[in-house]
Image: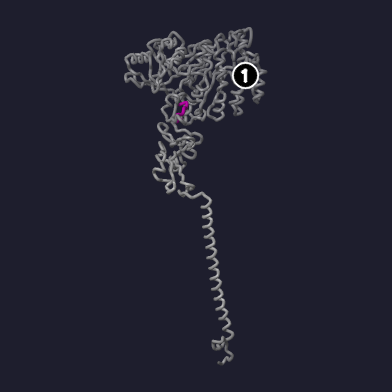
Amino acid sequence: MKQHKQSHLLCFLLPCLLLSIPFCSEARFVVEKNSLSVTSPESIKGTHDSAIGNFGIPQYGGSMAGTVIYPKENQKSCKEFSDFSISFKSQPGALPTFLLVDRGDCFFALKVWNAQKAGASAVLVADNVDEPLITMDTPEEDISSAKYVENITIPSALVTKGFGEKLKKSISGGDMVNLNLDWREAVPHPDARVEYELWTNSNDECGVKCDMLMEFVKDFKGAAQILEKGGYTQFRPHYITWYCPHAFTLSRQCKSQCINKGRYCAPDPEQDFSSGYDGKDVVVENLRQLCVYKVANETGKPWVWWDYVTDFQIRCPMKEKKYNKECADSVIKSLGIDSRKLDKCMGDPDADSDNPVLKEEQDAQVGKGSRGDVTILPTLVVNNRQYRGKLEKSAVLKALCSGFEETTEPAICLSTEMESNECLDNNGGCWQDKSANITACKDTFRGRVCECPLVDGVKFKGDGYSHCEPSGPGRCTINNGGCWHEERDGHAFSACVDKDSVKCECPPGFKGDGVKKCEDINECKEKKACQCPECSCKNTWGSYECSCSGDLLYIRDHDTCISKTGSQVKSAWTAVWLIVLSLGLAAGGAYLVYKHRLRQYMDSEIRAIMAQYMPLDNQPEVPNHVNDERA
């Protein structure tokens, strides 16, 4: 193992550029693959391997179906297809176009860029030699290519020469070739947490790729910290270093580019040993950033690394001559990082001994298991599988989210940041209400789903594909609950009612099913109102108007007419007084009768009592007691 490590590390010689380090024969570069399944024609139906391109945005965690087209002109896709009046944009309702092109004559990325501009949804590059699959990479540092590489958003893959010839033969024979590109297992998900690592660099003046890396770290910081704080992921930063061959440790080049007596080196940022910053300045800052992570991790806050790195980029850039310890210390202080623990972690860069932190980094560069050697910066590894694709926030987040088992993803994986454009094409085949701008189509990083939505607190229910309707309280506020509604001349009516058993019911004055239509009832014609002899009826939309002849007034509640003149009012009052007077006389008569009968009753009672004490003239004497006990 030691011999392998040394032969591997000797590949990282000083003249090598940091961002494109060549590797020797013993270095192992793993090609990340995805599955490609041909569904028709029957003659080539089956599953094949393809190598994911190291640019664009692979659909990690999802799949894509399409029809393969092999162009009759510009078959290597090295020129713009508009020069040949060719377009690959899919017609409404048609499957996406997968463009098959040949390898050779220009960069892989340029082929894909030209295909994307012509409307292709994905690109398959057929190899021109019989060899194992390789990874299509971006061009070397080149400003002109960088402009289009960063704008590539479609996935691409390399297929073998033999399989490419089978595809071409079927297409030329008139067959319709349909296939699925499947990235669902491109990232394994062995447990409920995703482990990922980013091989990065503190040098901010190394060209286009360094600019891209700095921009990614700044953009991805928020999402990374949410995932880390929630315990969904475990992140670790890494930094590439190499050592100076023993024979050159005392040379001026090694002394300026290395620390710890040539053990840990980085190339000169300006590729000029006589001016600007030295490689050892980069190694020291890389070491500091590693120790920031370690110290923060010990306190249970590993996400502080993202704060330090982004702040250091902003406050301590090389171009402003602030890439130094003093500026780094000010960032460390502002973040509350323990500087004593940090200094202890970094150790002495002038010591003639191993630095434990950097030695661990050199060991980690060697590939283990399914992961190959790290030879290119930046490199992202997710669940020990090397990420292929654009180093951009949404693309990387999609790859991380695909590392979770389905239905276990954190909320950030289902947020709007993860939306694709599947719902923009025919609404994804889901239900929608165009008038209310409501749709059941929902984009996730795994693909679109048809699910009845929740709108302003009102839940829609249905299958999500052909039917969704609002339910529960407040449903009438959403497009009238799907019921009939109409407005005329400033008057609006709706058939929506908030009842448990009834959802749509035509309002008074209308008849119909309440859903598709409600027709006005002609109360006059159907004799439902205004039927008194003096009434005159006129129908209106949703109601009626009733008037009375002469000076009569219509009372709607009783459907009758009464007079509104003064004489009639007097007559009415006269009748009222007559009734009151009659009631008064009757009450007085009853009182007199009652008083007379009461007097008669009193007289009879008095007479009976008096009769007990003295005989009346017309009655014999009656004894009322006994005097003699013997009698």
Q: Residue at x 55, y 70 (%)?
A: 592
Q: In this orientation, does residue 132 appear?
A: no
Q: Residues within 10 Å of mark 1 (few under 14, many from 20)?
A: few
Magenta span main SS: strand
Q: Residue 416: x percent and y percent?
A: 51, 27
Determine whether, in the image, residue 245 is placed left or right of residue 559.
Answer: right
Residue picked out by circle 1:
314
* Residue 566 to residue 37: above or below: below
Task: From the viewer's side, name the closer residue of 35 and 428.
Answer: 428
* Residue 280 to residue 197: above or below: above
* Residue 412 to residue 484: above or below: above
Determine whether, in the image, residue 30 is placed left or right of residue 346.
Answer: left
Q: Residue 373: x percent and y percent?
A: 50, 17
The amino acid beneath tag 1 is Ile
Residue at the limit of the structure toward the bottom, as seen here: 630
Q: Which residues are magenta?
A: 438-446
Q: Residue 292: x percent and y percent?
A: 61, 23
* Image quadrant assignment for residue 272: top right
Determine whether, in the image, residue 225 is placed left or right of residue 482.
Answer: right
Let me know if residue 263 is in the magenta part.
Answer: no
Task: From the viewer's side, name the closer residue of 7 and 267.
Answer: 267
The quadrant of the image that shows the C terminus is: bottom right
Q: Colour scheme used in the picture?
A: one colour
Determine whether, in the image, residue 181 is placed left or right of residue 608.
Answer: left
Task: From the viewer's side, name the closer residue of 266 and 26.
Answer: 266
Q: In this orientation, does residue 2 appear?
A: yes
The secondary element bearing badge 1 is classed as helix
Q: Residue 456: x percent and y percent?
A: 51, 34
